Amino acid sequence: MEQRVSLVTLGVSDLRRAKAFYEQLGWRGQEVEETVFFQAGGQALVLWDRSKLAADAGVVAGPPGEFSGVVLAHNVRSTEEVDELIGSAVAAGGAVTKPAAATFYGGYAGCFADPDGHLWEIAHNPGFPLADDGALLLPDFGDAAPPLG
């Protein structure tokens, strides 16, 4: 299998509210058949009704706001951008779940939840440089970490 993530789909309880939230953050999407698609670099972020998404995946939808075990991350080029983006999310109706602060890896990060409880980390990590187009470039970790297991 090729290493690629093509789409990230968020199950939402109110499609109009969710679309408005992301648009207030500056995202521009297209709505097609009760689904909103946002181009996000070489990937797409998709908003779809939570119960329809769960049924499509063959599972039962839990309550909105319950931790799903997924955190989306948006890396930026400076600590100032971290603060700006988290502030924009709050102004658009999001809630800070972890205030921005210095990290153990020498960066700066904080987290917010969108109106459906989907978690986003906004981070400046000097060890993960961004290309001019915003693509994240993972460093060669070499033997820096012991193997899992």
Image (tube, rainbow, N blue to C red):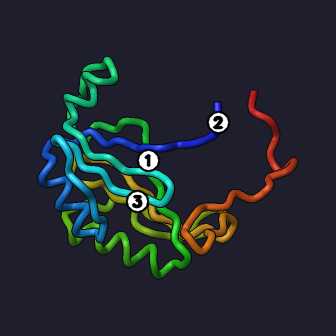
In this view, 40 is above or below 134: above
In this view, 64 is above or below 123: above
SS at mark 1 in the image: strand
Residue under the point 13% across and 45% down: 14
Q: Amino acid at mark 1?
A: Val
Q: Earlier in the sequence, mark 3 or mark 1?
A: 1
Q: In the visual, does 110 lie left or right of 55?
A: right
Q: Amino acid at mark 2?
A: Glu
SS at mark 3 in the image: strand
Q: Residues within 10 Å of mark 1 (few under 14, many from 20)?
A: some
Q: In which quadrant is the C terminus drawn?
A: top right
Q: Which mark is residue 2?
A: 2
**Distance between the alpha carbons at the discs numbered 2 and 3:** 30 Å
Examine the rendering and report whether any part of residue 80 can be seen: yes
Residue under the point 37% across and 72% down: 85
Residue under the point 40% across and 44% down: 8
SS at mark 2 in the image: loop
Q: Position of residue 30 (x, y in %)?
A: 24, 55
Tell whether label 1 touches label 3 (CB within 8 Å): yes
Residue where numbered disc 3 is placed: 111
Which quadrant holds residue 132? bottom right
Q: In the visual, does 125 lie left or right of 17?
A: right
Q: Position of residue 100 (x, y in %)?
A: 44, 69
Q: Earlier in the sequence, mark 1 or mark 2?
A: 2
**Residue nearer the viewer, 112 or 11:** 11
Q: Which mark is residue 85?
A: none
Q: Which mark is residue 71?
A: 1
In this view, 85 is above or below 46: below
Which quadrant holds residue 130? bottom right
